[in-house]
Image (tube, helix red, strand yellow):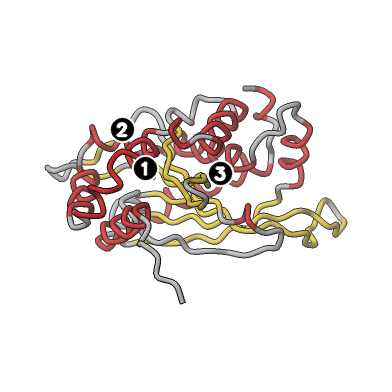
Amino acid sequence: MRRLPFPSHRRFVIAAMRAGRRSYPVHGLLELDVTEAVAVLDAHPEKLSFTAFIVAATARAVTAHPLVHAYRDWRGRLVVHDHVDVAVLIEVADEGRTFPLAHVLRDADVRTVADLSGEIRRVASDSNQSGSGRLLRARAADLARMPGLLPLAYRVVARSARLREMSGTVNVTSVGMFGESGGTGIAQPTIMTLAVLVGGRSLRPRVVGEEIVPRLVLDLTISVDHAIVDGAPAARFAATLTDLVERPSWVDAV
């Protein structure tokens, strides 16, 4: 039997989940054909990141339907940012252990998949490349002594436009990277109005033209806060995201 100190980064996770208790999430479970997308990413000289591809596709779909990343400020007004800042979890190593570090990919709606892939790799190799990594390293001891401040901090971030620019407006979590089988997950609500959870990939029969052929299919879950977004805009966002993921010709065009 061993007793280990509770990791400081988990306090952020717990605080984020507590802050999400006031949301009313509605979930959409999608099965997306990513056969062409994986081929495009693997054929690129830099071996583009699949997570970066989903981030870029999500951000572009949000640009087409901006209300899905809106939120309410202190006066109850809806705030819609001009660009899409996507918060992702990147596995990093610290003192012999690995943990998922929250990192914000800024202006993901106008950046290339190659550019986003490079940033993800840089943070994965050195957590100091991320502002949250530097904060966690510098303030880990303080967070351990004052855990009660984190839930309050998240409630402030939830309504502050200035702090939202730092923390992101959309959340993309990729759990499918750790396995090669299919699987759907439901993200825990946080302060984000929109969360996209990338599940597993597996070969499944799909109808292509008049034939049934094996295709690589991704399980992906979209969660929106129904207090902010109605069903119709959420459905239109899902349709746009599906089109961007399944028809990845835009990857070479940017």
In the drawing, what numbered circle is on residue 17? Answer: none
Nearer to us: label 1 or label 2: 2
Quarter assignment of residue 182: bottom right
- In the image, is 161 to the left or to the right of 90? left
Image coords of residue 193 (percent x, y): 35, 49
**Mark 1 near mark 2, Cβ–Cβ under 8 Å?**
no
Quarter assignment of residue 219: bottom right
- In three-dimensional space, the C-alpha distance between marks 1 and 3, rounded to whole angstroms, equals 14 Å
Image coords of residue 74 (percent x, y): 14, 43
Specify which label sits upstream in the sequence, 1 or 2.
1
- In the image, is 49 to the left or to the right of 61? right
Residue type marked 1? His
In the drawing, what numbered circle is on residue 241? Answer: 3
Image coords of residue 102 (percent x, y): 42, 44
The residue sitting at 52% across, 46% down in the picture is 93
Q: Residues within 10 Å of mark 2 (few under 14, many from 20)?
A: some
Disc 2 secondary structure class: helix
Disc 3 secondary structure class: helix
**Mark 1 near mark 3, Cβ–Cβ under 8 Å?**
no
Give 23 or 188, whichever is nearer the viewer: 188
> Which residue is tagged 1?
69
Specify which label sits upstream in the sequence, 1 or 3.
1
Residue type marked 3? Leu
- In three-dimensional space, the C-alpha distance between marks 1 and 2, rounded to whole angstroms, equals 12 Å
- In the image, is 30 to the left or to the right of 129? right
Residue type marked 2? Glu
Give the residue furthest to the left.
75
Count of marks placed on residues: 3
Specify which label sits upstream in the sequence, 3 or 2.
2
- In the image, is 67 to the left or to the right of 182? left
> Which residue is tagged 2?
165
The residue sitting at 39% across, 54% down in the picture is 224
